[in-house]
Amino acid sequence: MHRPFKTPIARAFPNIKVKEPRITRFVIFLCRLLGRGYLLFFLGIARIVLQGEDHLFNAFKRALAGESRCIIAFRHPNGGEPQLLSWFFLFRLRGLAARKGIRFARWPHAVFVYGYEVVRWGGWMARFIMPNLGAMPIHHSKMDSKGMARIYGAITDGPYPVALAPEGQVSYTTDSIPRLEPGAIRIGFYAAQRLAEKNANCPVEILPVSVHFRFGSWGRLTLELLLNKIERTCGISGSRRKRIPFMERVRQCRDHILEVIERRYKIKVETSASFEERLEVVINAALETAERMMGEKSEGDFFTRMYRMRQLCWDRIFLPTVDTFDGMTQIEGSTIDLQAGEAWYAGRHVELVDFCWYFRVPLPAEETVFHKKIEYAQNLWDFANRTMGGAFKDRVNIFPRKVIIQAAPVINLSERLPAYEKDKKTTISEAMSDLEKAYLDCINKANGVNQS
């Protein structure tokens, strides 16, 4: 159908479909050939260091031999963790384990769980690569029985570990844990139940993994360039930047951006309120604005509302019930384009809400460790970018000098099944607490903090 009219911002598209997940040798070859080059966009020439390697090696050895079922619960603060870990498991893990005399029953690999929105904004490459590496899509905010059945089957039947992020999405902070969703633990317990019903002597294990970036002289140069970019965006002249401490520079930019947002939403500012309190008001105003634009009621907790709005916006741009526009009249096609444009604008409020929830953090002090200053500057640019209508794809990443992959001891869920059968809620809560402690231990070890 000829569709001469479209909105200037967005237009509707037929539903995007991806192939059923499978592992294709040709795509594995492509990843081997091109994967390191692809990671240059995320890591530059950073050296990758593995810590807690015995936990990782032994978990993979058991899982690949069919002696256990492994769920790799990885932290997701930067966005590139799935790509990094997938490449590392495929092309580095086997050689590193062999140096310690550990042999795997098959070539190591892990199948990742991702949200359907990734193949929407990720383009044709994501739609081609991810299903052919066995990656499994799932809807975050609506029923997806097919997707859940696929994940359960991958855990109980193997042959590879399943990797997912208990944070649910990018969390923007490496050295703290803003929130964890219980999905990974619930999935693990359900899989453990299914295996127990089959009398399979095969425990389900959660393997906590955390990724940390460390920066060198290149990081110092690019941090200054990024700060200059943020200051220019905020209209702060070069003369006003001279000899101003880092903390004051980022405070000036942060406060300017917040004031612009408050004027946008016509928020009356309480002079005694902290930045975090003012940002909380912004978050509520932005989410309520998006809901009004999409004709939705403000029902449910915060993340339920935000995920629902994100899903509704995507579903107006990529129509889940439309495979082709053939047979539509010009008026019908133009109308759904207008609805897609409305959803795009509503989505700008949702993107701001998403980021701001995680940005309620104190300013870094002058003595703050360098990698946290870089993280704050990256997030400060994100704050400005989301204010201007941007999204995660516009994030500026500073290349690290070193990447630390830190693994922790596994959490055996099958051992906890008797307690789970008696009190599901308490047992899930305890397992979540143990997972959070494992992540905190990873953070401390990556930072060189003595645990004794």
Image (cartoon, rainbow, N blue to C red):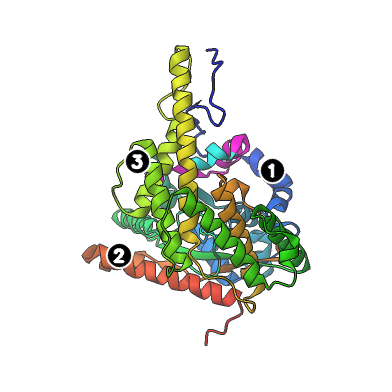
Instruction: Tell me if 445 is positioned left or right of 200 in this view.
Output: right
Which residue type carries mark 1? Phe
x then y, percent, for residue 383? 56, 55
Mark 2 to mark 3 CA distance (whole Å): 24 Å
Instruction: Tell me if 353 is positioned left or right of 131 in this view.
Output: left
**Residue at position x 24%, y 63% from top?**
421
Instruction: Tell me where the magenta segment starts and ends, as one range.
Output: 123-141
**Residue at position x 55%, y 12% from top?**
2
Which residue type carries mark 2? Leu
**Residue at position x 48%, y 60% from top?**
358
> Which of pointers 3 and 1 indicates the residue nearer the eye?
3
Instruction: Tell me if 259 is positioned left or right of 373 in this view.
Output: left
**Residue at position x 70%, y 48% from top?**
38
Q: Residue 212 magenta-drawn?
A: no
Q: Count neighbours of disc 3 (C-alpha within 10 A) and say few if under 14, some if 14 to 19, many if 20 or more.
A: few
Which type of secondary structure does the marked residue at label 2 adopt? helix
Label 2 belongs to which residue? 417
Mark 2 to mark 1 CA distance (whole Å): 40 Å
Q: Mark 2 or mark 3, which has the lower sequence index?
A: 3
Q: Nearer the viewer, residue 175 or 275?
A: 275
Q: Mark 2 or mark 1, which has the lower sequence index?
A: 1
Tell me if I can see residue 68 in this picture.
no
Q: Mark 3 or mark 1, which has the lower sequence index?
A: 1
**Res 343 → quadrant:** top left
Which type of secondary structure does the marked residue at label 3 adopt? helix
x then y, percent, for residue 195? 34, 55
**Res 130 → quadrant:** top right
Label 3 belongs to which residue? 145
Which type of secondary structure does the marked residue at label 1 adopt? helix
Q: Count neighbours of disc 2 (C-alpha within 10 A) and say few if under 14, some if 14 to 19, many if 20 or more.
A: some
**Mark on residue 29?**
1
